[in-house]
Image (spheres, grey):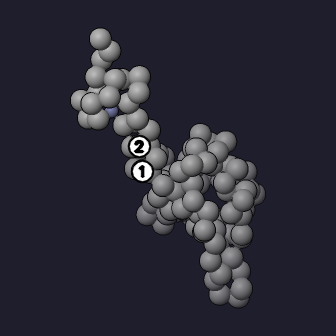
Amino acid sequence: MDEICEKCGLPKELCICETIAKEKEKIRVSAVRRRYGKFITIVEGIGKDVDNKKILKELKQRLACGGTLKGSVIELQGEHRSKVLDALKKLGFSEDQIEVA
Ligand SMILES: [Zn+2]
C-alpha cells in the first residue's frame, strides 16, 4: 500500500499539502502614485523564508531602478508591475502565487 499523508489522508503521490502551503504565500504586486505623480511599485507578501534583501537587489538590477526595503515590503521606483512579474518568475516564484493589482 502507498504511504499516506498524515495531514490530508491521501497517498503521498496525490498529496497536495505542500503545494497548498506554497500557494498560501501570495505575493502581491501593486503600483501607487506618490507625490509629484511618481509611481512606486510595491511587492508584498514574500515569505519570511525568502531573503528579501537578495530579492530587492535582483529586482533593482533587472529593472535598473532604485528601491528600498520597508520591513518585508519591497518598494521600487517607477511602474514596473509586468517586469516585476517576469523577474519574480525568473527568481523561482510561480505565477499562480503572484497577484498583480
Ligand atoms: Zn497531504
For badge 2, the amino acid type reads: Ile
Q: Amino acid at mark 1?
A: Lys
Identify which residue is drawn at 65% across, 87% down: 35
Distance, label 2 to label 1, CA atoms, is: 6 Å
**Which of 15/31 is in front?**
15
- The answer to which quarter of the image holds residue 72 is bottom left
Name the residue located 42 percent from the left edge and 50 percent from the top edge.
Answer: 24
Which residue is label 1 attached to?
24
Horizontal placement of 21 versus 29: left or right? left
x, y (%) of residue 14? Answer: 41, 27
Camera-side residue of 90 and 26: 26
Which corner quadrant of the image does residue 37 belong to? Answer: bottom right
Instruction: Quadrant for the C terminus, please.
Output: bottom right
Q: Nearer the viewer, residue 40 or 64?
A: 40
The residue lying at 32 percent from left, 15 percent from top is 2
For label 2, the residue is 20
Horizontal side, residue 20 vs residue 6: left or right: right
Q: How many marks?
A: 2
Q: Quadrant of the N terminus?
A: top left
Q: Position of residue 59 (x, y in %)?
A: 65, 53
